[in-house]
Every structure is written in structure tokens, then in C-alpha cells.
Image (tube, grey):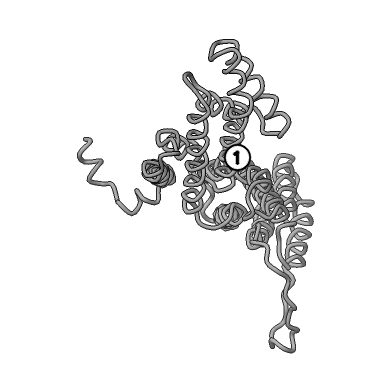
Amino acid sequence: MVVKKLKKINPRNLYRSHILRVGIFASLSSATAYTIAVFLPWVDAPVAAIIGLAALKPTFHATLRESFQQIMGTVIGAVFGLALVGLLGFNVFTLIIMITISFLVAWWLKLGEVGAITIGLTLILVTGPLSNLASIEARLFGVILGSLTAIVASYFILPGTPQERTTDASLRISNEASSILKVMATRLGERENKISLQETVLWQGQLESLIAQLIDLRKDAEDAVEGARWSPLIQKKEAIEALRYVENTEQTTLTVYNICNDMANAIQQENLLPDTVAINISQMLLTAATGINKKPTKKKKKKTATETGEIPVDVSEEFNANKNKAIDSIKNVDDTQAITLGGSLIQDATKLKKNIRK
């Protein structure tokens, strides 16, 4: 069984695996730091290798932040640690004092609990037992060397900037949600072949997968906004726009999911819309699906109808026209459940209207 699974592994896909890419560059970072330190007698090679591995994070800005914390821990160790160890020795009491100092510094620099722990770990590493001025200096240079190799390695882990990656991923998800909505809308308008419950279950599963991806993507976008403090590659304004774009995509995908749930509930209750209402709502949804979360682009001067030789089509006007037809047709329905379902679908489709491009 294991041999069969190994045979199915594609080396190209294996390299594209994010965790493997991080592992490869982490190994290179640690090995490079150790190799350089071996030829420099005033650098602690094991410390350089440890920091080269520990400081490397999946993103460039996170590595910069981690490296800063590592170096900060070393500086604190050199200033306070040597004095404390010289006066009291390395024991439980000095350990408590050093860790408390780490949290105070992290609070002052707004690094959070994780930053405080990082500083504390580095401080203990630098000012461990049998420390003297020479060993602390060697460990200090080891931390600096390991941090530098980690920063260089992290730059090549992921292509592009964080805001570009989140925007591109959000665009891909919004396009998938748009495709699912188009299928749903098309099937709603096909009155000869009714929508089955199995189809709605399939659509729900696909949309749930997209929503799960968007939750992780929103965390990445929020991290990019915070990372603007550390990385010169991140423009905070662009990072905030990317975060808003991800949040907009999430809301849109949730709305499409609600539409799918309405259809599934209607099928389970055998509550189907009249043909006229279903066709008009289908046209509304199709119009909305064409403009869901299109990637923001710089505004360009639009050519006139005379210049293009074409008659411009206002998508928003088309949507409003279909909406008015759907509302007029639902007024003639006597079934309360059908009116409720139709009204819910119209309301959800209207929520998507803000994503329609003119």
C-alpha cells in the first residue's frame, strides 16, 4: 500500500507543496548559517544553525518580525543577562527575572505573547550556564547570522507580495463561486428538467470548501496588514484593500451558499416556483454571476459607442429589469411558500448586485 502511494507521487506536485517548500528553504537556511559560522571563529555555529531554522517563517514579513525578536532577545541577554548571571549566577531566580523582562520588552514593543516567548527563548539560549562575555558575543553573532540566512531564504518561498497572493486567490475563489451560481441559475430556468436534491448537495459541498478556503485567506490578509510594519514589500494601503476584497468575496460566497440552501429546502418541501417566476429569477442570478467580485483594475477611459461601433450594454440596468419582472410575476402567485422562496432568492440576488460591473 505504501509503495503504491509513493509511486503515485508526482515530483512536480511535491515541490509545489507549500509545507515541503518551507522545509527545503528552512534546511538550506540552517545549513548555510552553520557552514558560514564554521569558518568564523567568533560565531557560535550551533546557535546560527538553530536560529536559521527557528527564525524562518512561511512569509517574508513574518521572518523579518521573528528575526527582530531573536536579535532583540540576544541584545537583552547581552545587557541584562550577563549582569544578572554575574551577580546571582544562572539559577531559577535569574531565569524568572529574565523571562519577566522578556514579557515587559515585548509589551513595550507590542510584539504580543508569541514575541515575548521568542525573546525569552533566545535570551536563555544566549545567557545559558557557563556564559561569559566571549560566549555571549559568539552567540550574538550566531543569532544575527542565522536571522540573515532565514530572511534571505524566506524571500524565495512564496512568489509575489502577500497582498498580490491574497487578491489572486480571492479572485480564483470568486470565479469558482460565480461558475457555481451560473450553473444553479441555468438549472433553475430549465423547467422541463427539475433540480434534484443531489445537485444542491453537490453545490453545497463545493461552496463549503470555498468558504473554508476564504476563512484561511482572510487570516492571511489580516496578517499581511499587520506585516506592513515589518516588510518594505508590503504597502499598508494595498494590504487593507486586499483584505476588504477577501471579505467582500467571503460575503458574496456566503450569499451564493444561502441561495443554494433555499433551493435545497424548497426541493425537500416539494415547494417549486412557478415557471415564470423561476425564469425571471434565473435571469437575475445569471446577470449577477457575470460580475461577482471581479478583480479591481485601474479605471480607464471608456470608448464611446461611436468609437467602438457598438451599443454599450448596462449590466446593472439589465439586472434591474429582470428584478422588476421577477417582482411583477411573483405578485400573481397565490402560494405563500412560493412567495417566500421567491422573495428570499430576489433578496439574495440583490445583495450580489454591488459586485456587478457596469
Left or right: 331, with 157 as reference point: right
Circle 1 Cα neighbour tier, 10 Å, few/some/many (<14 / 14–19 / ≥20) = some
**Residue 244 in view (yes/no):** yes
Residue 2: x %, y % from top left? 23, 36
Residue 41 location (% of width, % of height): 40, 39
Residue under the image location 21 percent in, 41 percent down: 4
Q: In this view, does 90 lie above or below 116?
A: above
Q: Choose between 207 and 220: the one closer to the eye.
A: 220
Q: Is residue 140 left or right of residue 284?
A: left
**145 lies above or below 299:** above
Which residue has dot 1 on it? 68
The C terminus: image quadrant? bottom right
Report the number of numbered marks: 1
Relative depth, front residue between 215 and 101: 101
Residue 124 is situated, as x and y percent measured from the top left of the image, at: 53, 23
x, y (%) of residue 177?
58, 52
Residue 191 visible somewhere in the drawing: no
Residue under the image location 47 percent in, 54 percent down: 156
- SS state under label 1: helix
Q: Which of 80 and 257 is in front in this view?
A: 80
Q: Which amino acid type is shown beneath numbered disc 1?
A: Phe
Name the image quarter holding residue 281: bottom right
Name which residue lies at 51% across and 25% down.
132
Residue lying at the far top in this picture: please name it. Answer: 92
The quadrant of the picture occupied by the N terminus is top left
- Front one among 1 and 50: 50
Q: Is residue 304 above or below residue 87?
A: below
